[in-house]
C-alpha cells in the first residue's frame, strides 16, 4: 500500500510539473506570436478596439466621430480646429454599436458637445457580429440581446478567436527570431482614433452593395437622434466621399428615398445637419482611395479639412 501510495504521489507530482511546464511554454508562445504579429502586421482587431476605448476617454474630448471603416480611415480629428475631437469609429460598426459606444462615453463621464456619425446607403443593412467577442464584454447583456447571444456563446467566441489568432501568427515567429525587418508600410491606428491603411486603388475596382433598411438599425439610429436631442448634443450625419463604381450599386430612387429618410429622422431639431458628401468631385478619382471604398490618408486629411469648414464646430 505504501509503495502504491508513493507511485500515486510521484504521478501527481509529474502531472503537476508537466502542467506547469506546458503553461509556461504556452505563455511564451502566446507572447512571442503577439509581438511577432504586431511587428509585421500591426495591432490586431482586439488590440485596436481595446486601445480605441481607452483613448476615447483618456482626454476631455468634446467631439466624437462614429461610423464604419470609411469613417475610421477617412476622418483625421486633428484637423478639426474648433473642437477637441476623437475618432471612435471601427470596421463594420453600424448604429447599434454606435449607440452603445455613446452609452459607454456617458458611463465614463465624457461630456459630448458634438457627435458626427457616418452613414452609407448600405449602412442600415449591416448587422455584423464579427467583433462581438470584444463588444459583448464591453457593452454587456443588453447589446448581446441584439444577437440572441449568451455567455456560453461569448466563451466559445473567445476560444475560436484565440485559436485563429495564434494559428495565423505562427508564420511570423521565425522571421521575428531571425530579426528580419518589418515593412515600412504597416497599417496602424493613431492615438486620435484614426486608422491609417496603406494600399493603392485601381480604376477596375468594383463592389456590390445593398440599400436594405433593417428595422433594428433604423431603431438604433432613431435612438441616437433622440439621445442627442435629450442631452443637447449637436448631432451631424455625414456620408463620406464615394466612388462612382460603388454608387452604381444603387438606383436614383433608392438614393433619394435614403436621403429623405435621414432628413425626416433628424427632424426640426437637427434640420440641415445632414451632409451628403458622396458626390464631391474632388474625391472621385481612384487615386484618392486605397481600394474601392476607403480614402487614403492624404485624401482623408483633405476631406477632414473640408468637413472642418463645412461643419464649423466650436467648443461650447
Image: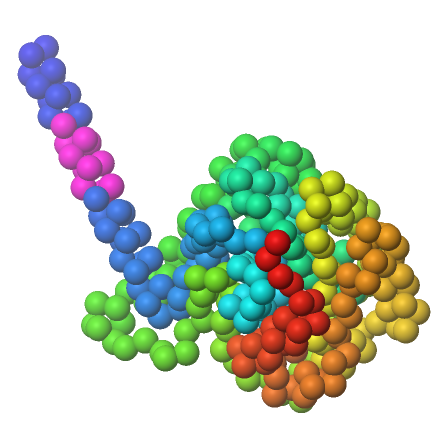
SS assignment for the magenta stretch, majority: helix
| Colour scheme of the picture | rainbow
Residue drawn at x 36%, y 64% is 38
Highlighted range, magenta: 13-23
Q: Is residue 147 above or below residue 190?
A: above
- Rendering coords of residue 143 (x, y %): 63, 39
Tell me where residue 295 appears, x and y as whole percent.
60, 76
Q: Choose top left, top right, bottom left or bottom right for residue 305.
A: bottom right
User: In the orientation shown, which residue stands out farthest toward the right?
Assistant: 253
Q: Residue at x 18, y 41 (%)?
A: 21
* Residue sitting farthest toward the front: 316
Determine the residue positioned at 53% across, 40% down: 109
Q: Does residue 301 appear anywhere in the picture?
A: yes
| Figure check: 37 above or below 252 | above
Image coordinates of residue 292 in percent, x first then y, are 65, 78
Q: Quadrant of the N terminus?
A: top left
Q: Is residue 116 left or right of residue 167?
A: right
- Quarter holding the C terminus is bottom right
Q: Is residue 220 visible?
A: no
Report whether 168 appears left or right of 291: left
Q: Is residue 71 magenta?
A: no
User: Magenta segment: does it hold 18?
Assistant: yes
Would you place residue 309 above or below residue 37 in this image? Answer: below
In this view, the residue in front, 267 or 152, is 267
Q: Nearer the viewer, residue 70 or 311?
A: 311
What residue is shown at x 57% (from left), y 68% (from top)?
80
**Residue 14 occupies which quadrant of the picture?**
top left
Left or right placement of residue 250 versus residue 157 in this view? right
Q: Nearer the viewer, residue 10 or 134?
A: 134
Task: Estimate the x, y position of residue 97 in percent, counting from the top left.
Answer: 63, 48
Name of the residue lying farthest toward the top: 1
7 left or right of 194 in image: left
Amino acid at each position: 500500500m505504501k509503495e502504491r501510495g508513493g507511485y500515486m504521489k510521484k504521478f501527481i507530482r509529474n502531472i503537476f510539473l508537466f502542467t506547469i511546464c506546458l503553461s509556461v511554454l504556452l505563455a511564451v508562445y502566446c507572447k512571442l506570436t503577439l509581438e511577432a504579429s504586431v511587428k509585421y502586421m500591426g495591432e490586431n482587431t482586439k488590440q485596436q478596439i481595446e486601445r480605441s476605448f481607452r483613448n476615447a476617454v483618456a482626454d476631455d474630448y468634446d467631439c466624437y466621430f462614429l461610423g464604419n471603416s470609411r469613417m475610421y480611415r477617412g476622418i483625421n480629428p486633428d484637423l478639426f480646429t474648433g473642437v477637441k475631437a476623437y475618432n471612435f469609429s471601427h470596421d463594420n460598426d453600424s448604429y447599434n454599436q454606435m449607440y452603445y459606444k455613446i452609452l459607454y462615453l456617458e458611463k465614463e463621464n465624457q461630456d459630448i458637445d458634438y457627435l458626427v456619425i457616418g452613414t452609407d446607403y448600405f449602412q442600415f443593412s449591416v448587422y455584423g457580429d464579427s467583433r462581438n467577442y470584444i463588444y459583448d464584454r464591453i457593452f454587456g447583456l443588453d447589446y448581446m440581446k441584439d444577437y440572441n447571444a449568451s455567455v456560453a456563446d461569448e466563451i466559445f467566441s473567445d476560444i475560436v478567436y484565440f485559436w485563429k489568432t495564434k494559428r495565423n501568427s505562427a508564420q511570423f515567429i521565425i522571421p521575428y527570431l531571425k530579426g528580419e525587418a518589418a515593412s515600412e508600410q504597416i497599417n496602424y491606428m493613431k492615438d486620435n482614433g484614426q486608422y491609417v491603411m496603406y494600399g493603392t486603388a485601381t480604376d477596375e475596382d468594383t463592389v456590390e452593395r445593398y440599400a436594405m433598411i433593417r428595422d433594428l438599425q433604423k431603431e438604433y439610429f432613431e435612438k441616437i437622434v433622440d439621445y442627442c436631442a435629450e442631452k443637447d448634443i449637436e448631432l451631424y450625419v455625414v456620408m463620406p466621399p464615394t466612388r462612382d463604381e460603388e454608387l452604381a450599386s444603387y438606383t436614383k430612387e433608392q438614393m433619394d428615398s435614403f436621403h429623405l429618410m435621414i432628413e425626416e429622422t433628424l427632424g426640426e431639431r437637427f434640420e440641415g445637419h445632414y451632409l451628403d458628401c458622396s458626390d464631391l468631385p474632388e474625391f472621385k478619382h481612384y487615386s484618392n482611395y486605397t481600394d474601392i471604398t476607403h480614402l487614403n490618408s492624404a485624401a482623408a486629411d483633405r476631406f477632414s479639412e473640408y468637413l472642418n469648414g463645412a461643419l464649423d464646430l466650436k467648443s461650447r
